[in-house]
Image: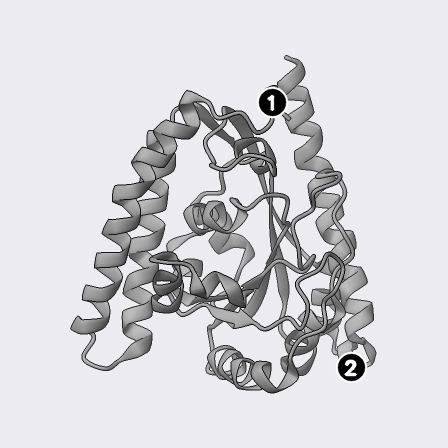
């Protein structure tokens, strides 16, 4: 982690100043797109997702003190992730991870995606409205404590129905962080994956893919009020091959959510090892 910890730098202030007009532009765009969609909510969400990706990428491009290594191209995403419905998982080491994924995802993936987010995020001024316009869905945890993952089943039921309908319709992508919380200890080691996160993948026999980013915890440290530290972020794409192979050969029927959670954790850790090793090599150069 960069020296200075939670101390704000010029990069933090510069990023915050740039983020304000970007956030306002995205808010206005989302509202306009939903009005222009004439009641077709999914069309409004798709246009809003396109705008979100464009504006986030613009914000990162303007942050010249942020270096992105192995940024996946459109071709990289297309080669890995098919047009069919699927799950894309993301490692979680910083509050910046969701925004970073939104900038790095391909147009095709972004336009088809719905993300699961902690319910309190939807109560944030401005951002909460944007999340709703993008079509993201809340996770209603019963407790907001580290390691406590039980959800309010009554509140979560209609959310799960929406997600299931989105994915079952064909071509829908569900994205989430299976660790369930920010890894504040060792970003080189992914935490245990929540079993319940994979119930939909089990039920609908969805292939699972992943995106890893190492270095976002430097860009937005846990003890820093704002993102924007000088940082290098290394990216990686991967597939949960063990599960996807079972889908392909018809032997996935006996796999439980616990089994799939272990498979996904192993695949994420393998990718994380690779990007963390490259990050360390770059830092030592």
Q: Position of residue 214 (x, y in %)?
A: 62, 37
Note whether residue 22 is visible.
Answer: yes
Q: Secondary structure at mark 2?
A: helix
Quadrant, the N terminus: top right
Residue under circle 1? 2
Q: Earlier in the sequence, mark 2 or mark 1?
A: 1
Residue 116 in view here: no
Residue in view at x 72 percent, y 73 percent: 150
* Left or right of 56 in this view: 95: right
Query: Percent position (x, y) of residue 81?
Result: 53, 59
Locate the C terminus by quadrant: top right
Q: Which mark is residue 253?
A: 2
| Position in image of residue 8 (x %, y %) | 48, 26
Q: Is 204 located above or below residue 225 in the figure?
A: below
> Residue 96 appears at what percent x and percent y?
51, 44
Give the residue drawn at x 23%, y 71%: 34
Count all numbered tags in the image, as a single digit.
2
Residue nearest the viewer, comparing 275 with 238: 275
Q: Classify residue 31 as left or right of residue 149.
A: left
Q: Is residue 52 above or below residue 213?
A: below
User: Closer to us: mark 2 or mark 1?
Assistant: 1
Image: 191 above or below 86 = above
Here the colouring is: one colour
- Look at the picture and state if 239 lies above or below 62: below
Depth check: give the residue in front, 134 or 211.
134
Residue 3 occupies which quadrant of the picture? top right
Residue for point 33% across, 69% down: 45
- Label 1, secondary structure: give it: loop
């Amino acid at each position: 982690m960069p020296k200075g910890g939670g101390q704000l730098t010029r990069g933090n202030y510069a990023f915050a100043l740039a983020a304000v007009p970007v956030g306002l532009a995205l808010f206005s765009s989302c509202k306009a797109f939903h009005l222009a969609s004439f009641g077709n909510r999914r069309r409004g969400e798709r246009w809003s997702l396109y705008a979100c990706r464009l504006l986030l990428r613009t914000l990162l491009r303007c942050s010249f003190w942020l270096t992105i290594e192995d940024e996946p191209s459109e071709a990289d995403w297309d080669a890995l992730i098919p047009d069919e419905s699927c799950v894309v998982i993301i490692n979680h080491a910083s509050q910046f991870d969701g925004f970073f994924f939104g900038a790095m995802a391909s147009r095709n993936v972004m336009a088809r995606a719905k993300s699961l987010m902690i319910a309190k995020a939807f109560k944030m001024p401005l951002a909460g409205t944007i999340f709703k316009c993008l079509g993201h869905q809340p996770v209603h945890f019963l407790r907001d404590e580290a390691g406590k993952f039980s959800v309010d089943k009554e509140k979560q039921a209609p959310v799960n129905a929406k997600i299931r309908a989105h994915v079952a319709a064909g071509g829908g992508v569900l994205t989430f962080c299976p660790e369930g919380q920010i890894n504040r200890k060792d970003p080189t080691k992914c935490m245990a994956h929540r079993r319940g996160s994979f119930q939909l993948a089990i039920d609908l026999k969805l292939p699972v893919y992943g995106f890893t980013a190492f270095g976002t915890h430097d860009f937005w440290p846990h003890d820093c009020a704002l993102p924007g530290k000088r940082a290098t972020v290394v990216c990686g794409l991967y597939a949960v091959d063990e599960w996807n192979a079972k889908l392909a050969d018809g032997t996935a029927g006996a796999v439980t959510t616990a089994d799939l959670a272990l498979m996904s954790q192993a695949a994420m850790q393998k990718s994380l090892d690779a990007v963390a090793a490259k990050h360390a090599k770059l830092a030592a150069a």
